[in-house]
Image (cartoon, rainbow, N blue to C red):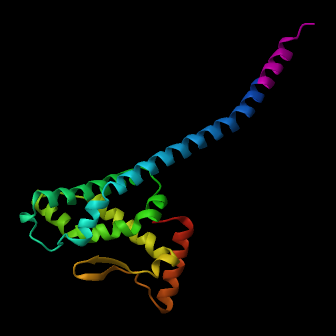
Amino acid sequence: MSLSNESLTLLLTTISTGVILLGVPIAIYNLRVISRTHHLQSLSKFMDDLSSTEVERLYLYRDFDRKSDYDSLDKESGAKVKKVINSLNRIAMLIENKLLSPESVLSISHTVIIRCFYMLEPYILYQEEKIGGRYARRIRRLDERAKKFHDIRPHQRINKIKIQNTNGSHVIYETDIRSGVKGIVQRLMWKIKYLLHVY
């Protein structure tokens, strides 16, 4: 029994359509697995990077004088400060290039970022004046995102972010919560940003 050209074409088209219909869900599933694996690898790299600067961050919080004469900063202290800056810069770059989820990073470390930037800001300004160009601007943007993340979450915004050092504990950031009509508008905007993950 032989098939006519029309019947053969119809059969091949049916088989091709069936293969495509079966292949598309498998391809989508594989892409999701690859995306999830890539996300986990990036997150793992971020966690390693964050933990690799733990000692330097403790120095920054406890012993670094943010109002000091940076020209007289000794080599070891300077290296610690730059290690923290480089780490935060890498993390910010990964977020900006969409290799890391902002929500994943900020949910783990937004207070770390805010504390670090508070301590580093005068040093960053000093470096910009010294080199005559932009320096660590990604970290400034990362700090702004971390503060937005803190503000739009009801369970976070009630907390004041503090630094503890030899001078005691002092508040370095707290959410500006408004009252009245401005407060209603502010909470509405926070709610929208929270639902849309805007930070």
Residue at point 51% right, 70% down? 193
Residue 65 visible in this rendered orientation of the protein: yes
110 lies above or below 43: below
Residue 160 pos. (x, y %): 39, 81
Quadrant where the image shows the C terminus: bottom left
Seen as rendered, the residue at the extreme right is: 1
Residue 173 pos. (x, y %): 34, 78
- 11 within the magenta span: yes
| Residue 13 appears left or right of 119 | right
| Residue 6 appears left or right of 61 | right
Residue 73 pos. (x, y %): 10, 63
Is residue 62 or residue 175 the one in the foreground?
62
Residue at point 47% right, 45% down? 41
Residue at point 48% right, 81% down? 186
132 lies above or below 15: below
Seen as rendered, the residue at the extreme left is: 72
- 19 within the magenta span: no
Main secondary structure along the magenta-highlighted residues: helix
Residue 66 sits in quarter: bottom left
Is residue 189 or residue 149 the one in the foreground?
149
Residue at point 18% right, 56% down? 79
Residue 99 visible in this rendered orientation of the protein: no
